[in-house]
Image: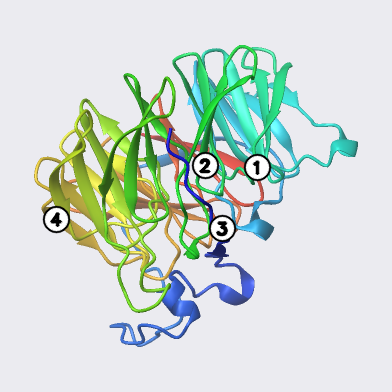
Amino acid sequence: MKHRSMLLRTSVVLLCAASLAGCSTVKGWFGGDKKKDDGKPNEPIELTDITPSVTVSKIWSANVGKGEGRIGVRQGPVVADGRVFAAAIEGGVHALDLQTGKQVWEFRPDKKANLRLSGGPGVGEGLVVVGGLDGEVIALDASTGEKKWEAKVPNEVISAPAIGMNTVFVRSNDGRITAFDAASGERRWFWVQEVPMLSVRGNDGPVLGPGFVFVGNDDGTVSALSATDGRPMWEQPVAQAEGRTELDRMADIDGTPVLDGTTLFATSFKKQTLAIDAPSGRPMWSAEHGGAGRIGLASDRLVVTDASGAVFGLDKNSGGALWQQPGLVRRSVTGAAVQGDFAVVADFDGYVHWLKLDNGEFAARERVGGKAVKAAPVVADGIAIVQNVNGELTAFRLQ
């Protein structure tokens, strides 16, 4: 197993709340790119009226607790077995019925423990697992919410654990992946990737393949680890962390890579997206569009968002740009999801946007509570679920 020394990192929090509502890129904070077509270099682009081409119905809403808005995490829901699992800094963990939003169970930590849940939830093998700002890892029974075990990692957990192969894989904010036995919580192994001095605030969990753990790193690389013992199998740069300053070198991969068959897709803050042959690590194609958030996967294309707020449709087989939607620039757009024939993203002002997959045109727009949405929407069984920083969950169905 390869262990690397960890550097003290200064994280950049990409918050677009209140006084910073116009900032969707790090450059905006430091007086960067001022040449904008709309003549308002530091303000979010104003939304224009659209004629909806699809009917979106809100089918339920619920609240799971507050806290995300103050610390810049991107906690979002996950769906499994007809249930929505969601957590919040101050609200515990909730299991809701996917179709109705009715609560199935709730886990509330003891107030004396001062447990602030910031990473998760992850779901699999009968468990719901969440992480905390002080490195706590809590495993719950997915059916009942009963606590099964608790463990600890050395740094805050701000991404959802991945569960599979009888193991819980937890990423902490110091570049470490720690593997725990799913049944007992006993630590099996850990692996550490050196982190840059400056990076985007936030990261996402690993993705699992047969015998593999794939991790997007803050230095712009993807690592493939053996799920059995954490041995590095290969490493592939998605973007080069190059430039004169630490700011220029930011190349974070902050969205969980997407595994589609044997092809792994990853996208970087440096606006690069890469398709990789997952077993070998061989690059298949590279595209000069992308960002730090999650990738939306459709049958023949990917949807990526970049730090400016532009949304792109990319050909899944070649990486070629099929379309670009510039109508959300500087609105701190989330990563993308795919719902039917539409891509779904959300923004700093609580708006959820549906874009046509074939050409990127706006198809519908709804608002969820008026607070920022940081986590990418999640789609399951034809239902899109959005969680804002106030812990408000909203579920939408297309008609």
Which residue is denoted by mark 3 in the rendering? 372
Residue 41 figure quarter: bottom left
User: In the image shown, does 268 or 46 lie closer to the viewer?
Assistant: 268
Residue 135, label in figure: none
Q: Look at the numbered discs 2 and 1 and tell me whether their residues touch, using CB distance below 8 Å.
A: yes
Residue 321, disc? 4
Q: Disc count in the image?
A: 4
Residue assigned mark 1: 154
Mark closer to the chain start, 1 or 3: 1
Give the alpha-carbon distance from disc 2 to disc 1, as whole Å: 9 Å
Q: Nearer the viewer, mark 3 or mark 4?
A: 4
Residue type of the residue flagged with mark 2: Arg
Mark 3–mark 4 distance (CA, rounded to whole Å): 28 Å
Q: Which element type, helix, strand or loop, lies under badge 3? A: loop
Residue at x 65%, y 45% (from the top left corner): 391
- For marks 4 and 2, give the CA distance: 34 Å
Tell which circle, 4 or 2, labels the residue nearer the N-terminal end: 2
Q: Earlier in the sequence, mark 2 or mark 3?
A: 2
Above or below residue 90? Residue 146 is above
Residue hosting label 2: 176
Mark 3: amino acid: Ala
Name the spot of residue 164 as percent of width and height, x first: 45, 19
Residue 113 place in picture, x, y as percent:
85, 37
Q: Residue shown at 47%/47% (left/top)? A: 4
